[in-house]
Image (cartoon, coloured by chain):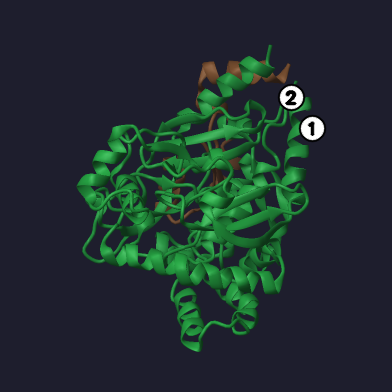
Chain colours: A brown, B green
Amino acid sequence: MDVKKINELFSKELKVINMGLDSFADNLRKEEVEVLHMGWKPPAGGSKRLIALLEKLDR
Amino acid sequence: MRANIEEVNQEAVSRIQRAKPELIDVSIAGETIPGMKRNMILHAGPPVTWENMCGPMKGAVIGGLILEGLAKNRQEAEALAASGDILFEPCHHHSSVGPMAGVVTWSMPVWVVENKTFGNRAYCTLNEGLGKVLRYGAFSDQVLARLRWMAEDLAPALKKAISRHGPIDMKSLIAQALQMGDEGHNRNRAGTSLFIREIAPDLVMLDESREQIARILTFIHGNDHFFLNLSMPSCKCTVDAAASLEGSSVVTTMARNGTEFGIRVSGLGDRWFTGPAGIVEGLYLAGFSAKDAARDIGDSVITETAGIGGFAMAAAPAIVKFVGGSASDAIRYTRQMYEITVAENDAYRIPTLDFRGTPTGIDLLRVVETGILPAINTGIAHKEPGIGMVGAGLVHPPENCFHDALEAFAKRYGE
């Protein structure tokens, strides 16, 4: 595995977009890494009942 | 199906955008509010019985009954309220809105605002000020004396001044107030100032004594929330024009009675969907804390429903000194509300967002899809009757009322 490019990436200043758990972004901020957190949640909070109701209306 | 919903929602929001609320009169509730009766008390939020009313609403009902001469004291008023002889109905069932407890009785003066485009009207009492006031559940002699002065002196003078002035363009006043740092719900300092500027030239030309005119202007000047009771009926007659549109998922009512939070959806007519009223997070007046607070209460969330209030907080960064949070929070709340609304307002614009229109027309389907709940700022009443205001803060509706409304909407339009 060529790790050279990965090492190159981490030797530069990182600009990170975090999608998912807030804590991933928080950890990077603690390390003083610039991070843009994208607020993302699964549709309808992942509720199968609500997703089914929304799909009914998409027909 | 979704395409049709989008289309009807565009029509709903177009009606909101085309609405032209104008202040046309000050009248007496019993003489002007449709369906009002002498033994009827209107209240904020969805329907609620006397037994289930929260403390501040009970306090306001007690005060209202004493004010009407139907009871001499708290004990008599409580007995009458529990007797079944008094009819309790939501303001919203009578084209009206009331801040906090929202109590309206027969002889109270009300603003009359007409939506010139569609001809429908909305009504709201006059604002008493902050602190120990009826709408926060206080009913002391001082509170009742102020209400009597408002009915006997303030309202008749304002009625004459408005008659002299002619209809006042509320849409224009609200739009200007947003440019000046208000959001029309809990910051109304600019709106109140603009209203004084509008009405003062006609007020001073009346036959009332100089002392009387000075007292009226001083009273309005001393109450930054005076304009709230004008922005609310303006928003009410605006959103009512979008109600009951077959197939629309636009939310046309949000309101709380201190016990429950309720919403109504355009395509589902007059049906309420309710959940427990929330706990407000905010700042407290000296001597009070969260343990004193009543739950979320009032019809003033009609402002958010129409695209101002919490939805326009980016226009009013100074509001955070009243409701808590930071100026960047205020901008974040507004930005988030674009995710759950159908359009950007073409009249109400936000200077700090490059004059972007406020997020307007809450879409039930987007609320459920995104899980983002409407952002509301609000006053906080003491949980016991008779005390009054204890603070102000931020609150969200309970999500179950949106889930239940979606279920009903899918049942009706998804088959």
Q: Residues within 10 Å of mark 2 (few under 14, many from 20)?
A: some
The residue drawn where x is 69% and y is 74% is: B164
Nearest-to-viewer mark from 1 and 2: 1
Which amino acid, mark 1? Answer: Glu
Do the residues at pointers 1 and 2 share their chain? yes
Q: Residue lying furthest top in this view?
A: B415
Image quadrant for the C terminus of chain B?
Answer: top right
Q: Residues within 10 Å of mark 1 (few under 14, many from 20)?
A: few
Reading the image, the residue beneath label 1 is: B7
Residue A11 screen position, x and y as percent: 54, 51
Q: Is residue B359 above or below residue A53?
A: below
Relative horizontal placement of residue B289, taking residue B410 as reference (left or right):
left
Q: Is residue A55 above or below residue B103?
A: above
Secondary structure beneath disc 1?
helix
Relative horizontal placement of residue B118, taking residue A6 as reference (left or right):
right
Residue B250 screen position, x and y as percent: 65, 36
Which amino acid, mark 2? Answer: Arg
Q: Is residue B255 above or below residue B351?
A: above
Q: Is residue B313 visible?
A: no
Image quadrant for the N terminus of chain B?
Answer: top right
Q: Are the residues flagged by discs 1 and 2 in contact, CB closer than 8 Å? A: no
Residue B121 screen position, x and y as percent: 66, 49
Q: Residue lying furthest bottom in this view?
A: B210
The chain that hosts pointer 2 is: B
Relative horizontal placement of residue B62, taking residue B247 as reference (left or right):
left
The residue drawn where x is 46% and y is 30% is: B274
- Numbered marks: total: 2
Q: Is residue B400 visible?
A: yes
Reading the image, the residue beneath label 2 is: B2
Residue B327 screen position, x and y as percent: 49, 64
As measured in the structure, the alpha-carbon distance from the residue carrying label 1 to the one carrying label 2 is 9 Å
The chain that hosts pointer 1 is: B
